[in-house]
Image (cartoon, coloured by chain):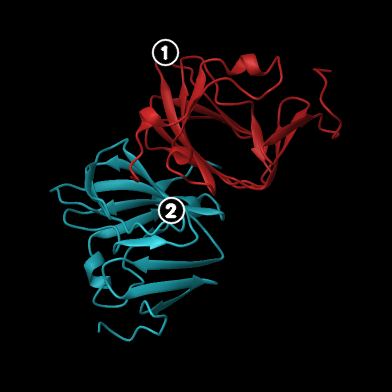
Chain colours: A red, B cyan
Amino acid sequence: MPVIDPLKAPHRTGSIYPEPYATMMRGRSSLRLGEAGGLTQYGVNLVILEPGAMSSLRHWHLHEDEFVWVVEGECTLIDDQGETLMRPGDCAAFPAGKPNGHHFLNRTDRVAKFLVVGTKAPQEIATYSDIDLRVELAGGKARFTYKDGTDWTGVR
Amino acid sequence: MPVIDPLKAPHRTGSIYPEPYATMMRGRSSLRLGEAGGLTQYGVNLVILEPGAMSSLRHWHLHEDEFVWVVEGECTLIDDQGETLMRPGDCAAFPAGKPNGHHFLNRTDRVAKFLVVGTKAPQEIATYSDIDLRVELAGGKARFTYKDGTDWTGVR
């Protein structure tokens, strides 16, 4: 059955980030809609931001295109150009390899939701714009490093 | 600027289908949002169906994952299992290679809109479930054939 029952989609909470960053993701969760529907070439997640939550650390992807469509509430996009308030029906695209770090904040007092699509590249590097951190993703494993490529062992 | 202005997105009308099928797509158009945002790995289109319009001939993709999210109005999904009425926030996934032909009809008296995401595979074959037609897509070119692989020259 191609129609996806959101109640049966995997609901992910928490974060793969090392601390102290994982804790900063409190109030963010996502429904893995594409996974629930059997898609493998890209992910489609419905991200749910409680009041005060953020979608991720500000980051950009080397190999994966990203697309966001706001579904409910209001999200503030933060990127290299500044801040943009986005409402339902507003959308944004972040082409692979463009080093424009971005994330979304819910600064309102009600829940905000957006769809995010991201290619599932065999290998990926995400770089976190505001801190000395990046992550290499391959084969379902994540290796966090400093921006000089050495293993991350804590905030320095 | 990552935020996409829908007024600046390419607005496609018409169809690449040969007649008599192209005419059947009247009332369908799409905004190429992903293209407007510089994405190359998958397409993201906002499909607009006027009352009575259909999204496409009923079809399935060999190599490309497809995902649909209803944004406005009501769409009737037709697939091998029958009919499913879909409303804003409902979504469906069609994994590459699964031969479940599908399309969406607007049987209401007001406009319906849905987002559709589709991988941009280097080569693709789409097969039309209800008629003797398929299409091979590569390098920006489309070759329509009968299901036996010979060139399509008209309804037979």
Look at the picture and state if A116 lies above or below A49.
below
Split into 4 quadrants, where in the image is the N terminus of chain A?
top left
Q: What residue is pinned by disc 1?
A: A109
Chain where mark 1 sits: A
Q: Secondary structure at mark 1?
A: loop
- What's under tag 2, amino acid-wise? Ala
Q: Is residue A94 left or right of residue B151?
A: right
- What's under tag 1, amino acid-wise? Asp
Of residues A33 and B18, the one nearer the viewer is A33
Q: Position of residue A57 (x, y in %)?
A: 64, 26
Look at the picture and state if B124 lies above or below A65.
below
| Residues marked 1 and 2, same chain | no
Quarter of the figure with residue B152: bottom left
Q: Residue at x 31, y 42 (%)?
A: B70
Look at the picture and state if B79 lies above or below A140.
below
Q: Residue at x 27, y 59 (%)?
A: B28
Q: Secondary structure at mark 2?
A: loop
Q: What residue is pinned by disc 2?
A: B9
Marker disc for residue A66: none
Q: Residues within 10 Å of mark 2 (few under 14, many from 20)?
A: some
Quarter of the figure with residue B18: bottom left
Whether residue A100 appears in this view of the structure is no
Q: Residues within 10 Å of mark 1 (few under 14, many from 20)?
A: few
Q: Position of residue A134 (x, y in %)?
A: 75, 32
Q: Position of residue B121 (x, y in %)?
A: 54, 61
Of residues A3 and A115, the one nearer the viewer is A3
Q: Residue at x 31, y 58 (%)?
A: B29
Q: Is residue B2 left or right of residue B113?
A: right
Q: Residue at x 60, y 26 (%)?
A: A56
Split into 4 quadrants, where in the image is the C terminus of chain A?
top right
Chain where mark 2 sits: B
